Amino acid sequence: MIFNWLVKQPIKINRSRGRAVFSCFLVLIFTRTQVSLTKTKSMSLTAFITGATSGIGKATAELFAKNQIRLVLCGRRKERLDELHQKLGKLTEVTTLQFDVRNKEEVFSAIQSLPEKFSDIDILLNVAGNAHGLSTIQDGDVDDWDAMIDINVKGLLYVSKAIIPKMTKKNKGFIVNIGSIAGKEVYPNGNVYCASKYAVNALNKAMRIDLNNYNIRVSAIHPGAVETEFSEVRFKGDTEKAKSVYAGYKALQAEDIADIIHFVVTRPYHVNIEDLIVYPTAQASATIMNKN
Ligand code: NDP
Ligand code: 8X3
C-alpha cells in the first residue's frame, strides 16, 4: 500500500520528507519480517492436547492457536472438537482426534492415524481428567474410583506411552502434565481423586528422570480452584452445587492456566520449570478459602 502511494507521489517531495517516508517504509518491512519470523518459528511446533474440549485444555488450545502452534486436539465430544476445528483452523493448522483415554486400543490407533503433518509432536499436554464424586472413603462409589484412576492415571499413561517414542527418536520434546493441589495435599473426601493426582505428581517426576537422557523437558502444573466444568462433572451435573464451589471469591479461570502453560513451554530450551503450584489469591490451601 505504502509502495503504491510512494509511486503515485509527484517527484517534488522534498528530501527530508522523502527520507522520513523511506524510514517508515523500512520500519514497516522490518516489523513485518519479525512477525513472519515469529509465525514460522511457532508454526514449526506441534502440540497434542488431551482434554481440549473444555476448561483448561480448551483455553490452552485457543491461546496456542493465536500463537500459530499447530494443534492436535483430543476429547470424546465430537461436536466440540468440530467446533474448535472450525474456529481455530482460521488461526493455525488443526486436526482432531476423538477417543476416550480409558480405552487403550482407541488411544494407540487414534495416535497412529495422525496425518504426517501432525505426527511429529513437540509438546504433549496431558490435561484430560476430572474428579468424580466427593465423599468419604467408606461411602465412596467404586465406579467413581474406577473412572478417576482410569482417566487421570491410566489414560495419562496410555497417551504418554503412545507419544513418547516420537520424542525419544528425535531427542527433543516437552511433556506438560496437569496435576492439582490435590496431588500435593489430601483433603477431606478427596481420597481417590487426591490419590490419582498424587500419582500424576509421581509420574511427572518419573518422566523427568527416565527421559533425562533424551533431552526431553517435563513439567507439572498444579492448580487450585479453576472455574471450569470440573465441579459439574464432580457433582454429576448438579449445576447449583457446582456453582457454589466458585461463589464468594474470584476463582482461577481456565485462561490463567493457559497463560502459565504457554509461559512454561516458551522458555528457552535449556530451561525446564519442573513443578508449579498456582492458587487463586483467595485460596491458601486445599481447604482454606477466603470467601465473602
Ligand atoms: P473440564 O471438565 O472443563 O475438562 C475436562 C476435560 O477432560 C474435557 O475436555 C474432557 O473432554 C476431558 N476428558 C474427561 N474424561 C475423558 C476421557 N475419559 N477421555 C478423554 N478425555 C476426557 O475440567 P478442567 O479443565 O478443569 O480439568 C482439566 C484438568 O485440570 C484435569 O486433569 C483436572 O483434574 C485438572 N485440574 C482442574 C482443577 C479445577 O479446579 N478445575 C484444579 C486442578 C487441576 P470430553 O468430555 O470431551 O472427553
Ligand atoms: C481440582 C482442585 O481442590 O477440587 O483439582 O481438588 S480441588
Image (cartoon, helix red, strand yellow):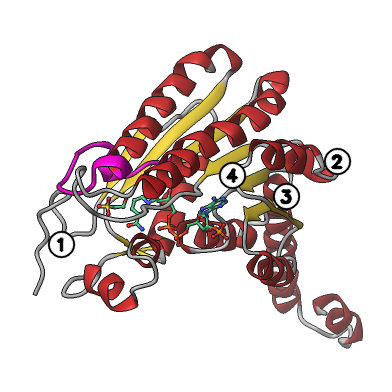
Report how far apart the C-alphas of labels 1 and 2 lie in the structure.
Answer: 46 Å
Please identify the quadrant where the N terminus is shown: bottom right
Q: Earlier in the sequence, mark 1 or mark 4?
A: 4
Q: Which residue is drawn at 31% across and 56% down?
A: 133
Q: Which of marks 1 and 3 is nearer the N terminus?
A: 3
The type of residue carrying mark 3 is: Met
Q: Is residue 28 at all visible to an observer of this figure? A: yes
Q: Name the residue under label 1.
A: 282
Is 9 within the magenta?
no
Report how far apart the C-alphas of labels 2 and 4 lie in the structure.
Answer: 22 Å
Highlighted range, magenta: 178-193
Report how far apart the C-alphas of labels 1 and 3 lie in the structure.
Answer: 38 Å
Q: Which of the two discs, 2 and 4, sits closer to the camera?
A: 4
Q: Could you tell whether 82 is left or right of 227 in the image?
A: right
Q: Earlier in the sequence, mark 1 or mark 2?
A: 2
Q: How crowded is mark 2: few (under 14 residues within 10 Å), some or many (20 or more)?
A: few
Q: Name the residue under label 3.
A: 43
Locate residue 30: give its quadrant: bottom right
Q: Mark 4 points at which residue?
A: 101
Q: Earlier in the sequence, mark 3 or mark 2?
A: 3
The type of residue carrying mark 4 is: Val
Q: Which residue is drawn at 50% across and 25% down?
A: 270
Q: How crowded is mark 4: few (under 14 residues within 10 Å), some or many (20 or more)?
A: many
Q: Is residue 265 above or below residue 133?
A: above
Q: Is residue 252 above or below residue 213?
A: below
Q: Which of the two discs, 1 and 3, sits closer to the camera?
A: 1
| Residue situated in front as seen by the camera: 265 or 282 | 282
